[in-house]
Image: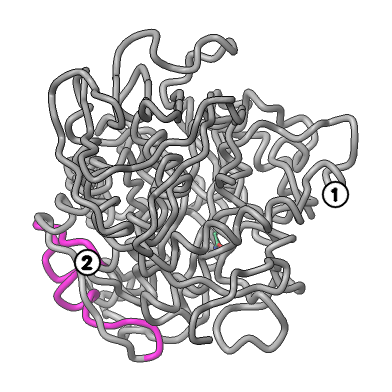
């Protein structure tokens, strides 16, 4: 009963494990201690039990975390960096992994296997053996902090919630027409002016560089890589409003809090703009230990094709010169001569329209790979059902839990095979999403579907994806998961496909 479904989870004949009052977490191997402390905190907050962490071999009834070469799920042919093994029996629980990331994901599985709330009963886990590793290296969630600003604490709450689903990339959409959210020391007005507003007149706000570093470190401790996005050359009104010299006529436009797209653009070839791009990319790259810097490039409806190509080729080269791999929305596929290895993020439908498949394949021809975020399945800001007060409906059909679950990355774009897919990502745009509670309502349970698509083995390709993915079985597991969301205080939408457990008092 785990989401994402593990590669192998087998009941064993052993007696169940009971988390006794004397249970400890025994650690061995570099990195095990930090993960044990996180596990200890999870158990304390969700099950009301304090577990000591000890650097000695496990005794009967302990939980052991062992990180060492050969401890991963190797016997099924995988040497995935993020794989783990988990054994549960009366003698104890043992999580084995070759890497700290693998052990951390093993801990997430154990969290889900433990009963969520301490009702005073014994905390019992049936004996099982789990061998598990991800299908894709990149499993992402995106939070648009530009349209509505979310505080560092709120972003950390989001990080905690996505970690339970083994999501390992947090894409932060940091800049847009409605707000600039990251302090850039060499261009301070970006946040002083451009960070002062949000969609619909909502609060402004921004992250100082120290706050951003703390968010990045908090995510890294949970084996989540932050992917910062500076959206260029469109979606830049907040920057243009902050600095008159970025505008062709030298006049800053007013700040913008509406919901239109495509009206703003930076100037290609202008020396001030070039300096701006270099300064911003250098500072953002310096704050980013992860490999990726997202450059946006979407919906540049006010940029000529020639300027678009020249602007993004230059900006991507600056990103490479700062040691990062450029990532961009699928529109970058139009541009010849992007740096080798540039990653594309596909956001057309699960059945490509127009030239979107061609745009995605261009990244592969350029030696890169593709992240799939089909907007009719993976965009978490789309309404769950017609008439929802929060959410957009431009995709034409509401995104039910089934719509987000019943598709497969390897069957979206003809010619885009498994080896060219870096992974999947579920973006949450926040034009209509104003609070962190609303964020969670939109994200859960649909992120569970995208996380499972990114982690769990591909469904049988001898049958249509509609029958190969078992929505009912998935919904049963989501129902179990909701007990953990309740325990963790994570909000979720009670979609009709899921047989939710009865709530006490509701
Ligand atoms: C996008 O939805 N504009 C990438």
From the viewer's perspective, tell me whether residue 158 is left or right of residue 210: right
Look at the numbered disc 1 and give the secondary structure of its residue: helix
Q: In this orientation, which residue lies closer to the viewer: 62 or 3?
A: 62
> Helix, strand, or loop for circle 2?
helix
The front one of 66 and 19 is: 19
| Image position of 112 with respect to 118: above or below | above
Q: How many marks?
A: 2
Q: Is residue 267 visible?
A: no
Of residues 42 and 152, the one drawn nearer to the viewer in this rendering: 42
- Specify the label residue 476 is tagged with: none
Q: Position of residue 498 (x, y in %)?
A: 68, 66
The secondary structure that dominates the magenta segment is loop
Give the vertical position of 373 relative to 362 (above or below): below
Q: Residue at x 47, y 42 (%)?
A: 125
Label 2 neighbourhood size at 10 Å, few (<14), some (14-19), many (20+)?
Answer: few
Label located before the other in sequence (2 or 1) = 2
Position in image of residue 344 (x %, y %): 54, 41
Whether the residues at callouts 2 and 1 have beta carbons within 8 Å, the answer is no
Residue at position x 83%, y 31% from top?
461
Q: Looking at the image, which residue is at 56% across and 47% down? A: 3
Q: Is residue 215 above or below residue 58?
A: below
In three-dimensional space, the C-alpha distance between marks 2 and 1, rounded to whole angstroms, equals 39 Å
Q: Position of residue 377 (x, y in %)?
A: 68, 58
**Residue corresponding to mark 2:** 153
Q: Which residue is mark 1?
A: 466
Which image quarter: residue 224?
top left
User: Can residue 113 be seen in this snapshot?
Assistant: yes
State which region is magenta.
181-200
Q: Say which of 332 and 488 sits in front.
A: 488
Image region (quadrant) for ligand 1: bottom right
> In the figure, is residue 383 to the left or right of 204?
right
Does residue 352 show up magenta in the picture? no
């Amino acid at each position: 009963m785990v989401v994402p479904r593990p590669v192998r989870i087998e009941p064993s004949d052993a007696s169940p494990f009971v988390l006794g009052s004397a249970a400890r977490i025994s650690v061995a191997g570099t990195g095990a201690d930090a993960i044990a402390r996180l596990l200890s905190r999870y158990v304390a907050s969700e099950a009301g039990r304090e577990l000591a962490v000890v650097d000695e071999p496990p005794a009967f009834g302990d939980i052991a975390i062992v990180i060492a070469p050969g401890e991963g799920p190797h016997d099924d042919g995988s040497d995935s960096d993020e794989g783990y093994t988990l054994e549960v029996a009366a003698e104890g629980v043992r999580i084995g992994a070759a890497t700290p990331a693998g052990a951390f994901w093993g801990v997430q599985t154990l969290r889900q296997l433990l009963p969520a709330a301490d009702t005073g009963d014994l905390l019992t886990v049936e004996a099982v053996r789990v061998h598990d590793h991800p299908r894709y290296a990149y499993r992402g969630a995106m939070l648009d902090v530009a349209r509505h600003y979310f505080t560092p604490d709120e972003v950390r709450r989001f990080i905690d919630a996505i970690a339970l689903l083994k999501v390992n990339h947090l894409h932060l959409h940091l800049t847009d027409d409605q707000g600039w959210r990251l302090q850039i020391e060499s261009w301070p007005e970006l946040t002083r002016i451009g960070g002062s507003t949000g969609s619909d007149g909502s609060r402004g706000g921004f992250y100082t560089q120290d706050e951003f570093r703390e968010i990045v470190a908090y995510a890294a401790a949970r084996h989540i890589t932050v992917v910062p996005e500076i959206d260029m050359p469109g979606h830049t009104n907040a920057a243009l409003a902050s600095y008159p010299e970025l505008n062709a006529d030298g006049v800053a436009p007013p700040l913008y809090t509406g919901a239109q797209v495509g009206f703003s653009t930076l100037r290609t070839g202008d020396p001030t703009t070039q300096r701006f791009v270099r300064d911003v990319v250098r500072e953002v790259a310096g704050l980013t230990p992860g490999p990726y810097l997202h450059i946006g490039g979407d919906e540049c409806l006010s940029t000529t094709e020639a300027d678009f190509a020249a602007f993004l080729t230059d900006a991507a080269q600056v990103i490479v010169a700062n040691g990062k791999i450029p990532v961009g929305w699928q529109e970058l596929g139009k541009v010849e001569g992007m740096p080798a290895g540039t990653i594309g993020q596909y956001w057309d439908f699960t059945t490509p329209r127009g030239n979107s498949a061609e745009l995605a394949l261009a990244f592969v021809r350029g030696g890169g790979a593709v992240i799939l975020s089909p907007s009719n399945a993976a965009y978490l800001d789309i309404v769950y059902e017609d008439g929802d007060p929060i959410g957009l409906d431009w995709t034409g059909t509401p995104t039910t839990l089934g719509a987000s679950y019943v598709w497969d990355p390897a069957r979206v774009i003809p010619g885009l095979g498994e080896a060219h897919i870096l992974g999947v990502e579920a973006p949450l745009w926040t034009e209509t999403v104003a609070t962190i509670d609303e964020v969670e309502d939109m994200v859960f349970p649909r992120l569970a579907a995208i996380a499972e698509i990114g982690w769990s083995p591909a469904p049988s390709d001898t049958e249509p994806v509609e029958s190969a993915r078992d929505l009912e079985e998935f919904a049963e597991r989501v129902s179990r998961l909701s007990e953990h969301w309740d325990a963790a205080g994570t909000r979720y939408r009670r979609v009709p496909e899921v047989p939710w457990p009865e709530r006490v008092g509701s």
